[in-house]
Image: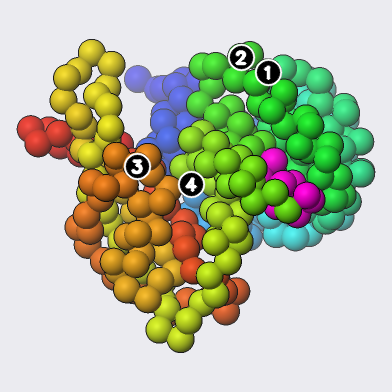
Amino acid sequence: MARSIQDLMEDAYEKLDVFDSKEALVIGKKLVAMQYSGGFEIMALAYLQSDKLERAIKVLKEGVAQCPDVWVLWQLLGNCYSDNDNYDEAINSYRQALECPGANPSSIHLNTAISLSRQDLYDASNLELSLVTDNETQPRRESLRLANLIGLQRYDDVIEEAPRVAAIIETEHAEDASARLDIGRIYARMAEAFLHGPNDLTAAKDASCRALVYDKTNESALEVLRSINARARGERDKIFRILVEGQWNEPFEGEDVLPKFYTTYWVLAATDQEALLFAGELEPDEVGSSLRIEDSSTEPAAKWQTLKGVYSRSGYAFFDDDEEVKG
């Protein structure tokens, strides 16, 4: 029995959700053969998941040529051009998307604003954000708006607005996991404002730590913490990738056992034990003292990595002694 287009699209999105880009690509090609425009979208997303940006652009150019009234294809093409630093083509694609029937203006204006911000056109980006009106995109809109204010060096405005904006988003988008990432971004911008504006290191550190509560992997917050510590790279320093086992400081709801976890840090340090000390500073005190290195490897530091400390980290994969790892 032939499967419906809707079933195939749902299957394709499920494959993408589990990073099975190969199978998603197969489904996308089948949908294109059925002359359904969504097939171009699926193929492009599969190529992007496989880090094949140029292939994604090629597919989308074919898609908009065959289906010029599908706004999703134009927007995705604009995103790809923006990721490829081809900003003129990106903006043109977004403008084409706005002309399509049934277009989502807020989504398109948001992506246009992102492209403008990447070009350091912060005022133009914020003007575009003023056209983003739907509630669904509020978290991303506000985190980008504050990032633009950082670019404009309007640090006092960020310090004043960030806590209020974060509180509103947390209230209105409490069930949205992606909104937590935007709250993390907002506090990271607040940390940057305290650091580069009044040079209040205590407030900058506090805001960075609050950012990491919402997004453990927020690299802007990690950068602020490295700047605050201000420990210059030494001749013996290298990047340590340490896989760490630890124990959380409170049980999950409805459970009595303190869960254990694995997490990975990438740290510029002289030894793996020094790397572990830097990692422990990012955890609650009780958790930090429980950390031990499960595995460690090294690689040379890049030229831009000039300050010691944590440069990146993964999330947690929790487990207990009787269960498999769950992340």
> Reading the chain from its start, which is encountered first: label 3 or label 2?
2
Color theme of the render: rainbow
Instruction: Say what secondary structure mark 1 lies in.
Output: helix
Q: Which mark is residue 217?
A: 4
In terms of depth relative to the viewer, which is nearer, 145 or 158?
158
The correct choice, above or below, for 324 with respect to 22 in the image is above
- Asked if disc 2 and disc 1 are in contact, CB closer than 8 Å, the reply is yes
Q: Residue at x 20, y 57 (%)?
A: 294
Q: Residue 145, percent across and down?
A: 79, 37
Q: What amino acid type is highlighted by mark number 3?
A: Asp
In this rendered view, identify the residue nearer to me: 221 or 47.
221
**CB contact under 8 Å: marks 3 and 1:** no
Could you tell me residue 119's position as x and y percent? 83, 56
Q: Is residue 121 above or below residue 7?
A: below
Amino acid of disc 4: Thr
Magenta residues span 189-198
Image spot of residue 69 (x, y percent): 79, 31
Q: Secondary structure at mark 3?
A: helix
In the image, what residue occupies the spot 84% across and 37% down?
A: 157
Residue 168 marker: 1
Judging by the rendered image, the residue that carries numbered circle 3 is 285
